[in-house]
Image: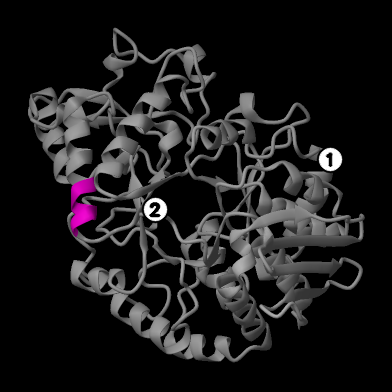
Amino acid sequence: MSIKNKVQLITYPDSLGGNLQMLEYVLETHFPNTFQGGIHILPPFPSSGDRGFAPLTYFKIDPKFGTWAEVSKLAAKYDLLIDFMVNHISKESIYFQDFLKNGKASKYSELFITLDKIWQDGKPVQADIEKMFLRREKPFSEFKIEKNDHVEKVWTTFGKQDPSEQIDFDIESPLTRALFSDFMNHFKKQNIKIVRLDAVGFVNKKIGTSSFFVEPEIYEFLEWIQKLAQSLEIELLPEIHSHYSIQYRLAEKGYWIYDFILPYFVLETLINKSAKQLVQYLRQRPHNQFTMLDCHDGIPIKPDLDDLVDSNQARKTVDVCLKRGANLSLIFSNKHKSADGFDVHQIRGSYYSLLNCNDDAYIAARAIQFFTPGIPQVYYVGLLAGENDIENVQKTGEGREINRHNFTLQEIEESVSKPIVKRLLNLIDFRNEYPAFNGTFQVEDSSEKFIHLSWHKDLYQCQLKIDLNTYHSVIYFKNESGETSTLIL
């Protein structure tokens, strides 16, 4: 199986119409031939939090979304991408609930990391913790074991509550590897084509390191699960938010990676009307990447763009985004902040709103994305040119909800009639159908105010030209007869 070089959709199971059945209806009604690359369905499993990213199991679909039968219907028409949270599982899972009852006498106890696996006496050492790349104030939670009232400290990388609802797996345990094999075999039975390894960079815990992307240990796990996936004809997509050099090392080993650098560079280019950094980046980046502009989290800055972006310039871009309604995700660990204190992990907001709802700027952003080598993904809010959902942020207290609006059927119908959405759909059709995108990419002579990108394969050639002064974007392309046509975006 190979990943198709065509546009994919990213969506929650309930974000386009309310459930999986309605998702199929929306796709067939409004986008019947749009997402030839497939559909990334964000976690549809029963979950205790983090909008699906704290799964109880992978063997069931949350009933409010539907069943595996609805997933199978979609899988018959689209290549499906599903998330596998290899770092953690819900505290409400049968596995951890049994551990809460029986502690280390539980048949599932070896799935989890009690602190005596990290520190011999089970007592955390603050000096070690300070070296770690933290996603919460401390990387463990305390739980009282029902059987003996003993308090057990268990590793929990993520989670807003204390104790956390997301319990880390011990990926060194044979029991964990066996469970992962069961999950992956189940995906195969359901005809899942691509599995995203969510939070895979956190799976190794090692004293004296950041406990993030611990080398060489991480490669042993990736090689193991890659071999398993290949035996099941499943493609893997490791999800790593890290310094770009780590991503590049993965790419050199032949793994697909996410281009978490492109969203910020495109945004900065269009805000500042300067293509210098973007053009330089496009000339040197690996091509085996999935590209995106927006997603269910935010636009990465730290640590993804460390050493690529000046923090003073980044502050200016962040300030523009804040004025346009964005909110921020910040770095917890002082060690991983910039020397001048800059600590923005991600900018959160709809990409359309971050570009000030400027249709020409937005279509220019998508054109750059689609001409950038890789597999382009379009997030459902971006597909419909959705704006910041401030009301939902205020309602939930969750900053990421700014770009997680659930669209009703009526809202979808209204959105697809908007000129900017029609322009985007035309651009997606061109990206899906024009043969040159399977050929050779070139950054042509560009200037600070002008972007010129091209693709060619055999007789087919296409060029994207963008004037940053006006955001005017045009594609020039040749047909089989060698005649040149123009697509004004």
Label 1 secondary element = helix
Dividing the picture into quadrants, the one containing residue 88 is top left
Stretch in magenta: 184-189
Q: How crowded is mark 2: few (under 14 residues within 10 Å), some or many (20 or more)?
A: some
Q: Is 405 part of what is drawn in magenta?
A: no
- Residue at the spot x=63%, y=86% of the render? 422
Q: Where is residue 42 in the image (x, y as percent from the top left)?
A: 39, 60
Label 2 secondary element = helix
Residue 477 vertical position relative to residue 334 in the rendered view, above or below: below
Question: Mark 1 highlights which residue?
Answer: 312
Left or right of 132, for residue 427: right
The amino acid type of the residue labelled 1 equals Asn
Of residues 395 and 262, the one drawn nearer to the viewer in this rendering: 262
Q: Can residue 358 be seen in this view?
A: no
Question: Mark 2 highlights which residue?
Answer: 50
Examine the residues drawn in magenta and state their main secondary structure.
Answer: helix
Comes first in the chain, label 2 or label 1? 2
Q: Where is residue 430 in the image (x, y as percent from the top left)?
A: 62, 76
Q: Is 187 part of what is drawn in magenta?
A: yes
**Coloring scheme of the render?**
one colour
Q: How crowded is mark 1: few (under 14 residues within 10 Å), some or many (20 or more)?
A: few
Location of the C terminus (image quadrant): bottom right
